Amino acid sequence: MKGTIFCTLLKREISEGYCFELCNIASDDILIEEDKGKITDWNKAQKICKECARYEE
Protein backbone atom coordinates (compact mmCIF):
# COMPACT_ATOMS: atom_id res chain seq x y z
CA MET A 1 0.00 0.00 0.00
CA LYS A 2 1.43 3.34 -1.03
CA GLY A 3 2.04 5.83 1.75
CA THR A 4 2.80 3.23 4.39
CA ILE A 5 6.05 2.15 5.99
CA PHE A 6 7.11 -0.52 8.44
CA CYS A 7 7.45 1.10 11.86
CA THR A 8 10.20 -0.45 13.96
CA LEU A 9 8.71 1.20 17.05
CA LEU A 10 5.23 -0.33 16.69
CA LYS A 11 6.42 -3.34 14.67
CA ARG A 12 3.75 -2.98 12.00
CA GLU A 13 2.85 -1.04 8.85
CA ILE A 14 1.70 2.52 9.53
CA SER A 15 0.96 5.55 7.38
CA GLU A 16 3.78 7.98 6.68
CA GLY A 17 1.73 10.74 8.33
CA TYR A 18 1.35 8.73 11.54
CA CYS A 19 5.09 8.06 11.48
CA PHE A 20 5.80 11.78 11.17
CA GLU A 21 3.49 12.58 14.08
CA LEU A 22 4.96 9.87 16.30
CA CYS A 23 8.47 11.16 15.67
CA ASN A 24 7.68 14.82 16.18
CA ILE A 25 4.90 14.96 18.76
CA ALA A 26 6.02 11.99 20.86
CA SER A 27 3.20 11.81 23.36
CA ASP A 28 0.37 9.44 24.19
CA ASP A 29 -2.05 12.04 22.76
CA ILE A 30 -0.99 11.13 19.22
CA LEU A 31 -1.49 7.35 19.57
CA ILE A 32 -4.44 5.77 17.82
CA GLU A 33 -6.60 3.46 19.92
CA GLU A 34 -4.92 0.21 18.86
CA ASP A 35 -1.49 1.55 19.90
CA LYS A 36 -2.44 2.94 23.31
CA GLY A 37 -0.32 1.34 26.02
CA LYS A 38 2.31 0.03 23.58
CA ILE A 39 4.78 2.85 24.27
CA THR A 40 5.73 3.06 27.93
CA ASP A 41 8.87 5.19 27.59
CA TRP A 42 8.85 8.02 25.06
CA ASN A 43 12.59 8.67 25.53
CA LYS A 44 13.30 5.10 24.44
CA ALA A 45 10.74 5.44 21.64
CA GLN A 46 12.49 8.55 20.35
CA LYS A 47 15.80 6.67 20.21
CA ILE A 48 14.14 3.99 18.07
CA CYS A 49 12.70 6.68 15.78
CA LYS A 50 16.08 8.40 15.55
CA GLU A 51 17.74 5.10 14.52
CA CYS A 52 15.09 4.66 11.83
CA ALA A 53 15.72 8.28 10.75
CA ARG A 54 12.68 8.37 8.44
CA TYR A 55 11.63 11.78 9.75
CA GLU A 56 14.63 12.96 11.70
CA GLU A 57 14.45 16.70 12.37
Image (cartoon, grey):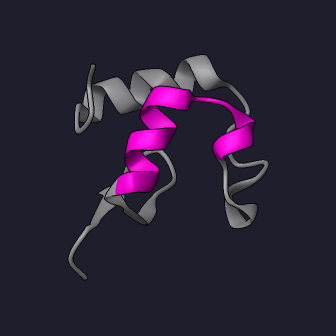
Give the image location of residue 30, x and y in percent: 65, 44
Q: Is residue 26 magenta?
A: yes
Instruction: Residue at 32%, 60% (x, y): give it.
Output: 6
User: Does 47 sit above or below residue 35?
Assistant: above
- Image quarter of the C terminus: top left
Residue 47 in which image quadrant: top left
User: Residue 33, position in %: x, y?
Assistant: 75, 63
Q: Which residues are magenta?
A: 17-30
Considering the whole magenta stretch, tell me its main secondary structure.
helix
Q: In the depicted view, which residue is nearer to us: 4 or 12?
A: 4
The residue shown at (79%, 48%) is 37
Q: Residue at x 68, y 25 (%)?
A: 41
Q: In the rendered view, does 15 fall on the left or right side of 31?
A: left
Q: Quadrant of the N terminus?
A: bottom left
* Total numbered circles: 0
Q: Nearer the viewer, residue 12 or 24?
A: 24
Residue at point 73% right, 40% down? 29
| Direction from residue 37 to residue 10 in the image, left or right | left
15 over 56 or under it: above or below: below
Quadrant hosting residue 53:
top left
Q: Position of residue 11 (x, y in %)?
A: 46, 58
Q: In the rendering, at what x and y percent does residue 38 appear?
A: 70, 48
